Amino acid sequence: MAGAARPRRNAPPREEVLVAAMDMIAERGLEKLTMAGLGRAVGMSSGHLLYYFRSKDELLLQTLEWSEGRLGVERGRLLNRRAPARERLDAYVDLYVPGGHRDPHWTLWLEVWNRSQNADDEARERQAAIEGAWHRDLVALIAEGSSRGEFRPVDADRFAARLRALLDGFSIHVAIGLRGTDREQVIAHVREFIGETLLVPDA
């Protein structure tokens, strides 16, 4: 009937928006992710998205947190298995390193960290929490392997910091598609480093 009010569409669940954002990054790249395009994908206006997320920076950070939450579940499953520490460390490395050029999670991670130069303290703390989860799990694994004689007796926190710096540097090369650096080469380099610095011979 002319003049009748249209029924209001309920806003989609927050996770649906974050899934759609990640899908758009995977399919089209981060540069094609716009609030208007995302709004069309989930049936919301860009204005409504800004109401819920306040800014594109906040949308990207929440999408990264959601993606990291899924990785955290997988990381916990891999690290809590009854398996040698070296096998679980290999699994950690496999999960850490990007799948290839323009890996959507790493593309998003790089963008969020690039924007963090102008982020407020609360956003920086949330980013630090993401890094902290990876670090704590690695420290615990290294300490366990050392206590069981699989790894050399090292300062687990210091070794984890250095190993993650190596992983980050190589992973950025893979994510941006640096010529001559692919996932298989990176994993081989990291495993060689672990073998030379952490493993007990013939353990």
Image (spheres, helix red, strand yellow):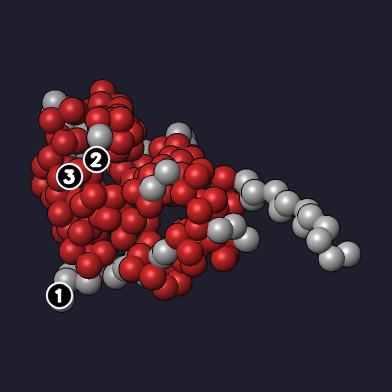
Q: Which amino acid type corresponds to the residue marked 1 in the rendered image?
A: Gly
In three-dimensional space, the C-alpha distance between marks 3 and 1, rounded to whole angstroms, equals 30 Å
Of marks 3 and 1, the one in the foreground: 3
The single residue placed furthest to the front in the displayed view is: 3
Residue identifier under label 1: 180
Q: Position of residue 151 (x, y in %)?
A: 21, 34
In three-dimensional space, the C-alpha distance between marks 2 and 3, rounded to whole angstroms, equals 6 Å
The single residue placed furthest to the right in the displayed view is: 1
Which class describes the residues within 10 Å of circle 2: few (<14), some (14-19), or many (20+)? some
Residue identifier under label 3: 117
Residue identifier under label 2: 119
Q: Between 44 and 27, which is closer to the camera in this rendering?
A: 44
Which of marks 2 and 1 precedes in the sequence? 2
Q: Position of residue 189 (x, y in %)?
A: 16, 58
In three-dimensional space, the C-alpha distance between marks 1 and 2, rounded to whole angstroms, equals 34 Å
Q: Position of residue 56 (x, y in %)?
A: 38, 52
- The reply, left or right, for residue 166 in relation to residue 113 is left
Q: Residue at x 57, y 65 (%)?
A: 41
Which of marks 1 and 3 precedes in the sequence? 3
Q: Residue at x 45, y 60 (%)?
A: 35
Q: Which amino acid type corresponds to the residue marked 3 in the rendered image?
A: Gln
Q: Is residue 102 above or below residue 53?
A: below
SS for dot 2: loop
Give the quadrant of the N terminus: bottom right
Q: Is residue 146 above or below residue 68?
A: above
- The reply, left or right, for residue 190 in relation to residue 51 is left
The answer to whether residue 60 is seen in the rendering is no
